[in-house]
């Protein structure tokens, strides 16, 4: 039985409310001032005047309040950014929701130097067997390793990579024809299989299956993604460890 996919929004550390953050900063500043005055009084054996203490506290509150307001504003911006661009807690990749949102808003790579870009949906072959045989921790390590290795092979800042669920990923390759995308995925597959020799276990080699589709600025991203998913289904049906598109297929070192 395959383990349920890890939720994209799981394991996010809770943030304190803005009021709590503001109070903590102001209280910390006041406490520091009290400690400073107490220490100075004991060392110099001088009792400061009441109006001097009041002035010091007022200045402290003003400064601490200003810093606290900036901190609260920054925290609110961080919360907004976390909601707009949530990341996968296991791999650190952007979420597929943000990827689809960026594509649908016209900020996709198809608006670059060339009219055509590609989307690749790929998965780790037989990850459920790896998880059942070697445990969840080992499977998570494999997922992170594949994410890191694949991300390092992205060619431009306009390329994007996200994890959909468990061992299933989606990549957008900017300014790339379908032939170029197939070649890129083929090289990634071969290089990953060669590098994965160190994590082979009981003769089972790590491999990936790819589904590739192209899209333009006039093509809905969802259609291209669905076409790539259909191509990935063909790769599964024809034996995995390969790159497939609806127009052609690339067999990449199947063993």
Image (tube, grey):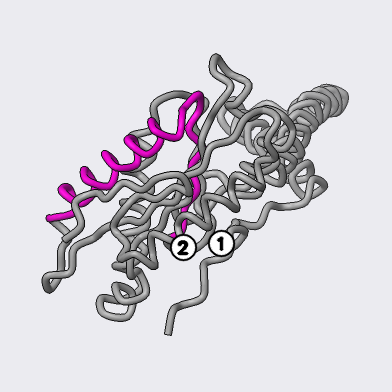
Quarter where residue 55 is shown: top right
Q: Position of residue 177 (x, y in %)?
A: 46, 29
- Are there few (<14), some (14-19), or many (20+) residues within 10 Å of tag 1? few
Point out which mark residue 223 bears. Answer: none
Quarter where residue 154 is shown: top left
Mark 1 or mark 2, whichever is nearer to me: 2
The residue segment tinted magenta is 168-197
Q: How many marks?
A: 2
Q: Are marks 1 and 2 in contact (CB under 8 Å)?
A: no
* Residue in the picture at 78% in, 41% down: 22
| Residue placed furthest toward the top | 113
Relative to 159, 152 lies left or right? left
| Residue placed furthest toward the bottom | 1
Which of 13 and 70 lies nearest the eye of the viewer? 13
Q: Position of residue 145 (x, y in %)?
A: 31, 51
Relative to 26, 186 lies left or right? left
The kind of secondary structure element at disc 2 is helix
Q: Specify the principal SS of the magenta part.
A: helix
Q: Is residue 26 magenta?
A: no
* Residue in the picture at 64% in, 38% down: 35
Point out which mark residue 11 bears. Answer: 1
**Which of the two discs, 1 and 2, labels the residue nearer the N terminus?**
1
Point out which mark residue 233 bears. Answer: 2
* Residue in the picture at 45% in, 57% down: 232
* Residue in the picture at 42% in, 85% down: 1
Q: Is residue 170 magenta?
A: yes
**Above or below, comparing residue 50 to residue 223 in the picture:** above
- Are there few (<14), some (14-19), or many (20+) residues within 10 Å of tag 2? some
Q: CA distance from mark 1 to mark 2?
A: 30 Å
Instruction: Specify whether residue 170 is in view.
Output: yes
């Amino acid at each position: 039985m395959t383990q349920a996919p890890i939720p994209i929004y799981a394991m996010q550390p809770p943030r304190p409310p803005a009021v709590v953050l503001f109070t903590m900063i102001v209280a910390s500043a006041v406490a520091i001032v009290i400690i400073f005055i107490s220490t100075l009084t004991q060392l110099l054996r001088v009792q400061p005047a009441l109006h001097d203490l009041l002035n010091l506290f007022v200045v402290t509150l003003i400064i601490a309040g200003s810093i606290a307001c900036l901190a609260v504003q920054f925290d609110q911006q961080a919360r907004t950014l976390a909601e707009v661009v949530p990341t996968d807690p296991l791999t650190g990749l952007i979420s597929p929701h943000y990827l689809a949102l960026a594509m649908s808003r016209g900020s996709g790579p198809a608006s670059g130097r060339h009219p055509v870009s590609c989307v690749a949906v790929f998965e780790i072959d037989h990850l459920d067997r790896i998880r059942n045989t070697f445990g969840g921790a080992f499977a998570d390590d494999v997922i992170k390793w594949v994410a890191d290795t694949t991300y390092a092979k992205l060619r431009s800042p306009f390329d994007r990579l996200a994890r959909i669920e468990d061992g299933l990923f989606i990549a957008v390759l900017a300014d790339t024809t379908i032939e170029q995308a197939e070649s890129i995925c083929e090289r990634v597959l071969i290089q990953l299989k060669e590098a994965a020799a160190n994590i082979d276990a009981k003769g089972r080699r790590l491999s990936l299956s790819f589904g590739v589709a192209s899209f333009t600025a006039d093509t809905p991203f969802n259609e291209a993604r669905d076409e790539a998913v259909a191509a990935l289904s063909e790769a599964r049906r024809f034996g995995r460890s390969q790159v497939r598109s609806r127009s052609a297929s690339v067999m990449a070192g199947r063993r």
